[in-house]
Image (tube, coloured by chain):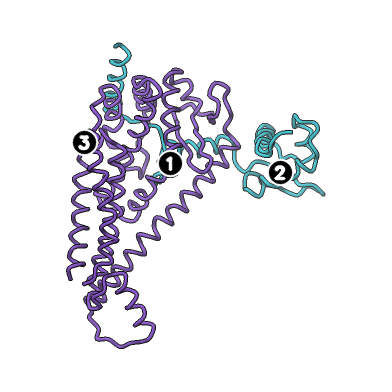
Chain colours: A cyan, B purple
Amino acid sequence: MKGLGELERSIMDILWAENTPLTAREVGRLIEDRDLAPTTVMTVLDRLARKGFLTRTRDGRAWRYQPAASRDAYVAELMLEALDMTGDRDAALTRFARAVSGSEAEILLKALTELEEE
Amino acid sequence: MIAAAVLAALAMICAVAAWRLTFARWTWRAPRTAILLWQSLGLTWGLASIGALLAFALDPYRKGVVHGLAEFLLSVEFGARQPYDYLRLAALIAGLSLLAVLVALPLAAGAQTLRARRRHRLLLALVARDEPAVPGVRVVDFPGAAAYCLPGLKSQVVISDGTLHLLSSAELEAVLAHEAAHVRERHDLVLLPFAALRRALPWSKLVRDAQASVELLVEMAADDRARQRCCPRRLATALLRFGTSAALPTPQGALGVSAPSSVMARVDRLVRPEVTLPAAHRFLILAGSVVLAISAPLLWLLPG
């Protein structure tokens, strides 16, 4: 039995891979863990929808779920913050180093070559 | 009037000292001591500025800021009529407003930071993966170089897939040791009040420079921790590889992203280490910081 967080992850992966909205039953069929109770899948889908990661539409008596945004969009959001390109210099993360550009990059490149030659 | 004058002088001294400290280079030889001095200067400046205004306003009570404020509140409550002195009233309002701003802004900044981190954590849980080569580290599939720490009760160290390709294993180890130091010493808590102060006074060059100095010192402190565990030269080459990894355009609104030479300054420190500041000097600075931090609250109690 996987943890809830890992289950959320694999369900998102399934929905990202399929390009159409799926019902809980269809998600359950695609999931690796066959022993999973259908109610568990429904609970996780509901949680993800409440967090805003999934949108759902009525289809007869069931809900169809689809991702609210693409995986790439989330990666981009994370990395914009990681590279401190959101514009507001908050203290949310502590970053290792920032990339530089132009003449400063050349200075760094020269220093790197020197260090590697030594 | 003595308390007000002394507090005003103290605030001035703090401002001048902070200005001098932004140029100081000895700080790089003892980053942790320097961070403490910065914190003490910031705190004392705030308390002394507020205290000077309030001490002037409440001078007629001759009881000091704390007891004077209590007496003032009592007199307001009982509706005692007093001859108004508009200058003192203005000082009172200014002092209380400054107090409100300096308390509310860090709180607001803290709340916003927590929200940003919670969102970041949620997204990481969905898109980051574990990598057998680097246990305990979250990996995000992104070609660029990124390595950072998401602080919190359960801090997470995150690197991009691109970092794995960019760095050798020894360099990666050095970077992870650096990030682990951030996690262990909760450097995010050091940075928070300075980021908040900058948000409060965005036009102040001194505050901007102070924030940049503290940011650099925090990185140097983490570098120092990392070099105790692994080869400083590998940390230096990792820094250089990061710095040159992407010719990123300067993002809009992110003016002055890192002081021009901050990466190079850190590399120089690692490759050509200077002698650490002598213990006696560090102790003196430490003692000075403590005295400074205690002085303002004491002056708040000084009558007259």
Q: Nearer the viewer, residue A2 or A34?
A: A2
Q: Which label sits on residue B186?
A: 1
Residue at the disc numbered 2: A45
Circle 1: residue type = Arg
Q: As displayed, is residue A36 above or below residue B112?
A: above
Identify which residue is drawn at 36% across, 48% down: B195
Identify which residue is drawn at 28% across, 64% down: B50
Of circles 2 and 1, which is in front?
Answer: 1
Q: CA distance from mark 2 to mark 1?
A: 35 Å
Q: Residue B43, how many percent across, how many down?
A: 31, 54
Circle 2: residue type = Leu
Q: CA distance from mark 3 to mark 1?
A: 24 Å
Q: Quadrant of the C terminus of chain B?
A: bottom left
Q: Earlier in the sequence, mark 3 or mark 1?
A: 3
Q: Which of the chains bears the disc numbered 2? A: A
Q: Which label sits on residue B25?
A: 3
Of circles 3 and 2, which is in front?
Answer: 3
Q: Secondary structure at mark 3?
A: loop
Q: Which of the chains bears the disc numbered 1? A: B
Q: Secondary structure at mark 1?
A: loop
Circle 3: residue type = Arg
Q: Secondary structure at mark 2?
A: helix
Identify which residue is drawn at 66% across, 50% down: A50
Crowd band around label 3 with a 10 angstrom C-alpha radius: few (<14), some (14–19), many (20+): few
Q: Residue B131, how many percent across, how many down?
A: 57, 24
Q: Residue B198, how many percent across, how many down?
A: 33, 51
Q: Which of the chains bears the disc numbered 3? A: B
Q: CA distance from mark 3 to mark 2?
A: 55 Å
